[in-house]
């Protein structure tokens, strides 16, 4: 009987691992194919010859993206956006989540504020009212139009709030008995205990700012102020340039680029920062999601 149970347990484990392996392959194959397309020649991509390995390898698509000085400028705008936007959101998330993590007895209007916060997740004013608000605040064509409209990520606030609810109350009570003020308790006791979930929401916020492109298209009129994602979305392969080119090497390079290879290169330019950063915060990411999600 024990042997049969052990055999069934191992069989179930094998089936589960097999299913997970298949799911991983389903997720990875499109990415590998896109990477192969980005390094392949236009003729091979258009002919459908590229599967999981580049055909006629070339860097022409990546060279076209970075050849313009505006690309470097857009990278700088995106880096500044991630730095400023993440810092602003981080400060708001922490200062909102801490009082909301208290009971209604401690924070008198806690439930009122909580309903106001949750309502923003259930109901949205829409794009036009948001644009009108940004317009009337005179933020159009301003760097702050990329920061302030998304400065309060409600999901992240709730995630941090739930995590703070699970912290031992005795720690804060001991600090209060020693004369610690609320700001001291928050900065020196609560925040160090919340490192996993704070790392998680920081990652969420930074990735969100890096990947966002639509707000740059509707709020910013000057291409010089575009973040990199908006800049990349505006790029197109303009083969009409061939008629004005006389350098054979330039003509050959441009012929190696097509819409398929160019779009594939766009995807990996956008993914690269996330791929570099994620391994360093993965343990906090997983821990913060699990611990912050199981509380009320």
Image: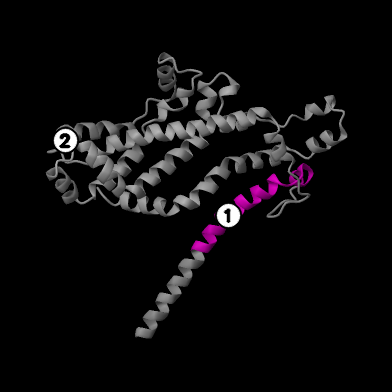
User: In the shown orientation, is residue 242 left or right of residue 125?
Assistant: right
Q: Which residue is mark 1?
A: 28
Decide: few, some or many residues near mark 2? Use Cα within 10 Å; few <14, some 14-19, many ≥20: few
Closer to the camera, 114 or 200?
200
Kindly check if marks 2 and 1 are in contact, taking CB atoms under 8 A apart as contact.
Answer: no
Instruction: Residue at 49% x, 23% y: name it.
Output: 143
On the image, the x and y values in percent for residue 103 come to: 16, 41
N-terminal-most mark, 2 or 1 = 1
**SS at badge 2:** loop
Residues at marks 2 and 1, CA–CA distance in whole angstroms: 47 Å
**SS at badge 1:** helix
Closer to the camera, 134 or 29?
134
Our reading of the magenta stretch's main secondary structure is helix
**Segment tinted magenta in the rendering:** 20-47
Label 2 vs label 1, nearer the camera: 2
On the image, the x and y values in percent for residue 64 come to: 71, 35
Taking the view exactly as shown, the residue that stands out farthest to the front is: 178
**Looking at the rendered structure, which numbered label has been put on residue 107?**
2
Instruction: Residue at 64% x, 47% y: name it.
Output: 34
Q: Is residue 85 above or below residue 5?
A: above
Closer to the camera, 187 or 217?
187
Q: Quadrant of the N terminus?
A: bottom left
Q: Is residue 107 above or below residue 30?
A: above
On the image, the x and y values in percent for residue 212 come to: 51, 33
Instruction: Residue at 46% x, 39% y: name it.
Output: 206
Q: Say which quarter of the image contains residue 232.
A: top right
Is residue 32 a member of the stretch shown in magenta? yes
Question: Residue 294, can we see it?
Answer: yes
Instruction: Residue at 49% x, 31% y: name it.
Output: 81
């Amino acid at each position: 009987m024990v042997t049969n149970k052990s055999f069934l347990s191992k069989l179930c484990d094998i089936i589960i691992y097999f299913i997970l392996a298949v799911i991983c392959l389903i997720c990875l194959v499109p990415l590998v194919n896109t990477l192969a397309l980005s390094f392949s020649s236009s003729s091979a991509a258009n002919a459908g010859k590229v599967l999981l390995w580049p055909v006629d390898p070339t860097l022409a698509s990546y060279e076209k993206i970075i050849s313009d000085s505006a690309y470097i400028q857009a990278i700088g705008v995106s880096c500044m956006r991630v730095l400023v936007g993440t810092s602003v959101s981080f400060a708001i998330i922490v200062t909102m989540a801490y009082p909301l993590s208290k009971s209604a007895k401690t924070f008198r209007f806690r439930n009122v504020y909580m309903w106001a916060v949750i309502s923003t997740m259930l109901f949205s004013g829409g794009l036009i009212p948001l644009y009108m608000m940004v317009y009337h605040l005179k933020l159009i064509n301003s760097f702050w139009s990329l920061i302030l409209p998304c400065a309060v990520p409600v999901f992240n606030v709730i995630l941090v709030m739930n995590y703070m609810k699970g912290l031992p109350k005795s720690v804060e009570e001991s600090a209060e008995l020693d004369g610690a003020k609320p700001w001291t308790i928050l900065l020196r006791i609560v925040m160090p205990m919340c490192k996993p979930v704070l790392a998680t929401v920081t990652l969420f916020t930074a990735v969100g700012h890096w990947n966002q492109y639509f707000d740059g298209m509707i709020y910013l009129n000057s291409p010089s102020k575009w973040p990199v994602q908006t800049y990349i979305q505006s790029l197109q392969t303009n083969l009409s340039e061939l008629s004005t080119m006389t350098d054979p090497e330039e003509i050959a390079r441009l012929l190696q680029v097509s819409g398929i290879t160019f779009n594939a290169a766009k995807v990996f330019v956008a993914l690269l920062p996330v791929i570099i950063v994620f391994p360093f915060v993965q343990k906090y990411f997983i821990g913060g999601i699990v611990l912050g999600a199981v509380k009320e």
